[in-house]
Image (tube, rainbow, N blue to C red):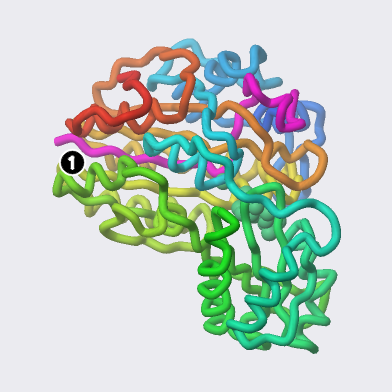
Amino acid sequence: MARAFIYVLDSFGIGGAPDAKAYGDLGADTLGHIAEFCAAGLGDRAGLRAGPLELPNMATLGLVEAAKLASGNYPAAMARPERFLGRYGAASEVSRGKDTPSGHWEIAGTPVMFDWGYFPEGPDCFPRELLEAIYDRAGISGSLGNCHASGTEIIKRFGQEHVWTRRPIFYTSTDSVFQIAAHEYHFGLDRLMKLCVVVRELTYDYNIGRVIARPFTGETAETFKRTGNRRDFSIAPPERTLLDRVNEAGRNVLAVGKISDIFAGKGVTQLFKADGNEALVDASLKAIAQAGDGDLVFTNLVDFDMLYGHRRDVPGYAAALEAFDARIPDIAEKLKPGDIVVLTADHGCDPTWRGSDHTRERVPVLVFGPGLRPGSFGVRDSYADIGESIAAHLGLAAGKHGRSFL
Ligand SMILES: O=P(O)(O)O[C@H]1O[C@H](CO)[C@@H](O)[C@H]1O
Ligand SMILES: [Mn+2]
Ligand SMILES: [Mn+2]
């Protein structure tokens, strides 16, 4: 029996990317800064959490050692275990984008060696001819926003006008994304999804990685709230990924959360949708219970990034890490001989950093399973080593990128 379970803690970087400076991210360190803030009493929030960051299970799997390998520093005030229950290391990203698809595809053995298209900073960031084509094809009279923005801020700013005019809110970020916020009832969820399909079609020529539907509810700037009905319309990965390779070998890929969207459905056998980290972990446990010999369960935990990293919310991020850490025994309990679990991340999103975008960082790679020999495999040059290690574990032929550390 050999099965593999990947959990991507979306945006859980551990600093130290060798090329961080080129991204304006020199010194960014998601874990390091959260630990530092918590140690200084800046991670407290009444009713949520207090004190130094405590991640006892991930620490036992090698997290603090991985952080030291990646950034040169131990995270502040975190306990350092003497014995480890997992194999650990850190990995740098070779893909040029510090975005979700680039990170996930590289984890799945397929780095992105081309440049994505981006929309420039400043007002009217979308080309006029693209907007005209969208209005024409979708039958809408115009749009609001049309700038770089944080998704929660922009619905506060334009939500009311959107409800009055029914014009969708268009915005982007330093990622290769075209995001569309619209009210679930006043605009309509189905209408938003159809609009995204049109925009997806029209943005292939601009080499845009994702069109993202960001539905929200509420009636005032104070009560507007994004819902769990977000959907990502991604372009397909440029080459076969680990998911296709598992699939072509006649095995199943069980995709939990955003994974299927991120891979444009390619190689996915079965989809498990859930909203929020807790429900996503529950869904992953169901997937694990169903997984057979040779199967892959691939889970994305989006809250770290969407609710806390982009929102620059240190206590929120710390509490979410602590909550996930407490679920690790639930995962460990489900393991059978021959199973391996990989905990990793797709990029950083340091909640102490300027702005609201992702940060270029190394990521932790924590591997555990019955009978797996503990110890360090050092800093890997590419996330692709993760995909190759899983491929080797599942008995698949070697791929084009990366080397197994198992
Ligand atoms: O600010 P919100 O809407 O959460 O957007 C963020 O989410 C996008 C996709 O993950 C990123 O590109 C960033 O813009
Ligand atoms: Mn991400
Ligand atoms: Mn993000």
Whether residue 199 is visible here, answered yes or no, is yes
Most foreground residue, 121 or 164: 121
Q: Is residue 125 above or below residue 333?
A: below
Horizontal side, residue 313 vs residue 180: left or right: right
Q: Is residue 307 above or below residue 3?
A: below
Disc 1 residue lies near ligand 2 with CB under 8 A: no
Give x and y (percent) for residue 35. 70, 28
Q: Is 6 colored magenta in this rendering?
A: yes
Segment tinted magenta in the rendering: 1-27
Q: Quadrant of the C terminus?
A: top left
Most foreground residue, 9 or 28: 28
Q: Quadrant of the N terminus?
A: top left
Most foreground residue, 47 or 53: 53
Give x and y (percent) for residue 160. 82, 81
**Residue ID at (52%, 79%):** 194
**Residue ID at (37%, 34%):** 109
**Residue ID at (68%, 26%):** 20
Dot 1 alpha-carbon crowd within 10 angstroms: few under 14, some 14 to 19, many 20 or more: many
Helix, strand or loop at disc 1?
loop
Q: Is 144 colored magenta in this rendering?
A: no
Q: Is residue 327 above or below residue 84?
A: below
Look at label 1 and name its amino acid: Gly
Q: Is residue 80 above or below residue 150?
A: above
**Residue ID at (60%, 57%):** 206
Give x and y (percent) for residue 28. 72, 29
Residue 180, by quadrant, is: bottom right
Q: Which residue is mark 1?
A: 294
Horizontal side, residue 112 vs residue 390: left or right: right
Residue 37, by quadrant, is: top right
Whether residue 337 is visible here, answered yes or no, is no
Give x and y (percent) for residue 308. 68, 48
